[in-house]
Amino acid sequence: MASKKYVYRFDEGRADMKDLLGGKGANLAEMTRIGIPVPPGFIITTEACREFYIEGRKFPPGMEDQVREELKTLEKNTGKKMGDPENPLLVSIRSGAPISMPGMMDTVLNLGLNDQTVEGLARNTGDRRFAYDCYRRLLNMFGDVVLGIEHQKFERILEMQKDRKNVSFDHQLEAGDWEEVAREYKRLIERETSNPFPQDPMEQLFMAIYAVFNSWNNDRAKIYRKINKIPDDLGTAVNVQLMVFGNMGGDSGTGVAFTRDPSTGTNQLYGEYLINAQGEDVVAGIRTPQPISALEEEMPEVFRQFVDTCQLLERHYRNMQDIEFTIERGRLYMLQTRNGKRTAQAAIKIAVDMVKQGLITKEEAIMRVDPAQLNQILHRRINPSARLDVIAVGLPASPGAACGKIVFDADEAEKMGQEGEKVILVRTETTPDDIHGIVAAQGILTSRGGMTSHAAVVARGMGKPCVCGCEALRIDYDHEQFTVGGQVFRKGDLISIDGATGQVIRGEVPMVDPDLSDEFRELLRWADEVRTLGVRANADTPEDAAKARDFGAEGIGLTRTEHMFMAQDRLPIVQQMILAAGPEERSSALDKLLPMQRGDFYGILKAMEGLPVTIRLLDPPLHEFLPHAEELAVEITRLRMTGGSPGDLAGKEELLRKVRSLSEFNPMLGHRGCRLGITFPEVYEMQARAIFEAAAMLVREGRRVIPEVEIPLVIDVNELAYLKEMVVRVAGEVMKETGVSFEYTVGTMIEVPRAALLADEVAAEAEFFSFGTNDLTQTTLGFSRDDAEGKFMADYLGKKILEENPFVVLDRKGVGKLMKMAVDLGRKTKPDLLIGICGEHGGDPDSIEFCHQIGLNYVSCSPFRVPVARLAAAQAKIKNG
């Protein structure tokens, strides 16, 4: 029975065979097909790699015979022969996965050289120095990649030779020096492996192929795949290609170029090259490369051919290309082309420019930009050319960069912020009590907490940089300092944080302000023309609402009223309301809060004039607005020990009793959400009145406002019916009192499984649903968010129990199934039921695609993620039809 085909010549492949031939191999085949000068060769398929692992790291049956056959074809076509001491065939061995993984796997150059063929190469080229330069490179690469000998050991031998000759650079060494280096390299290989360097070129070849297959699972490749969400089962192809030499003298060279600037997107060639060098010299920094434009003066004919080839490749692939090339004795060869990596700014400019050049459609331009990349340009960031003294790395919880003085206390952060000082609030973790300090700070740094901890969620909502879970920090509140790596940083010291990378940096670093280019705005306009999913924002202040509107939000999908209660001028009144002995005393406190809440809602509704604003009534448990029991106990002990005022002591003791009576074993599942509204209806009544009085004031001013009153955490239609009746009654009272009519709706959050399962019943009373997927994820998976991320989520992801962190990317199989069920059931009762999502997932591109697929009306996210959501919603429409 004929064996599978594991080996393809370049002239047998095409660009659309990437899954089988790998990206590099498919593009070499495509360049060969369209007549571009490519050194000939063949590709061993990714299927062979996958079977290599199935067979227990053995080559699949028939593969080696096919390699030998194609090698004979290569020998025939080139007139060279593997191992021939007179005219040796030399090849390169390179990896090539279906998805580009630059630098993650292994390469061997000059394969086929040995003690005899190196002499033949020297005779044929008339250049002994060149021949032994090639041989020592093979010995180094083969020793490192195939035999596992530490690269630094080869480097030490080379440095010693340069020291003996009193030279600084490799190219200053002569033929005899390279012969001596090669001898020392062979001795090193024999010492390290107890075997001499293999002289048989065929043995070299199969050992190198084995090493490239093996490199698919080296540590750096596995980490790269994990970071970039590349499947582990794709495998890598192996490209065996005739060597061409850029190190044959002044008419030879090698380089790397992009058809457009990968940093800015400007339509001009960008790259570097070296004369008399091999490929790795350009990236190794051994010599300073020349800009590609200088090639026009050194080799004008080669440069003209190179420019023409680059233009042909860009037109053919209809994308910016990253190209590797070699010039051998004045002749140009292309060794690789692939779609080039680029910054977010460049991706946008290139996509828009290519539409205008007629190379791609608007839909293709939309698909060319990764929504996650937009974080780079929507926040202030560190200047890429800055030199950084990184002292620690935490979780990149909220993008952007900030610099300021270290402070450890939220009150102090607020005070210093009001005085015009820039501060970084450093806490073990933040709580709602710290909100005023977070508002005042330039950025937040915590030693505990995950990507969806309080600090992370609040910072993202405000568009503030945040680094969480930086466990290397040892925070000492008593001495107002933190220690990291033996270094002490005190209150007032300057640090910088990068919320995009998680880096904590000593001192102040130069920043770059966000610049929303004309191309960016145009791309988003195209996205808006395509998408069917609405995009709203989560905003708690008029400033956030205005920012959201600037970024293109079509309404507010979540206003959290509890954040308004945390302001320092309100917290004492809120606490008075909580500690009230009865309804009368509680009403007195609520009367003071009413005008404050009315002002809050007036500002947000006004900022979003003409657009819907979903306002969630009070959600968190009441104890979150009170001091911590431990802190009160310490304060009581201090008063007792120091003979403090009896009145103060009695007041603190009463407060502690109240705090303990309100404390719960599991607050997330306790007395919160609509349960508060049912137990203390006067609280929700005050909030409803504040909303409707603000609406009436704005209508009287001639403005159209659309408040949507949201009841949180319902589990049963009876809860919603009870509270909706109260909201409707208050609306009627306000209309009667003011003589003003206004529009409004009443709906609910779906954030526990029972609400999703009974969505058809709940929809009978609801005018809209909004999925609160942060809590729905916790209640569906039975995970406490902070505990999961702090204690076991890394193991679940590392051991592939879960593919993604479900608090970052929506759990389609579990949470998603409940959402789909709720949508179907809700619309069975009310076909035109408005349904959205307001959890953190509303800004995640993968989650947005799922929301499109199940027929949601809108997603809602933090203001700074609105452009991300607009683009992701358009991509979801294009991908799913």
Image (cartoon, rainbow, N blue to C red):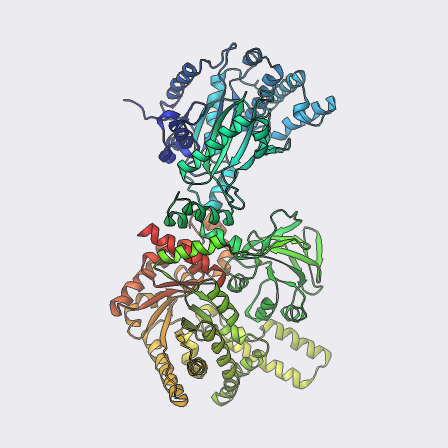
Task: Relative to 185, say whether 104 is above or below.
Answer: below
Along the viewing direction, whichever of 537 and 616 lies nearer the viewer: 537
Task: Name which residue lies at 58% across and 17% down.
Answer: 131
Work out which quarter of the rendered image holds the N terminus and state it: top left
Q: Position of residue 224 (x, y in %)?
A: 50, 42
Q: Is 651 placed above or below 492 here?
A: below
Point 45% across, 65% down: residue: 537
- Relative vertical location of residue 97 with respect to residue 712 in this rendering, above or below: above
Write the residue at 40% across / 72% down.
610
* Quadrant of the image occupied by residue 152: top right
Pick the front one: 192 or 547 = 547
Q: Give the mark count.
A: 0
Which of the 4 quarters of the picture holds residue 568? bottom right
The percent position of residue 605, horizontal first and vertical second, equals 45, 75
Give percent across and percent down for residue 832: 28, 68
- Asked whether residue 774 is in view, the answer is yes
Direction from residue 215 to residue 879 in the image, left or right: left
Residue 106 seen: no
Q: Is residue 386 left or right of residue 346?
A: right
**Where is residue 543 shown, x and y percent of the image?**
52, 70
* Front position in the image: 310 or 75: 310
Residue beneath the point at 28% across and 74% down: 764
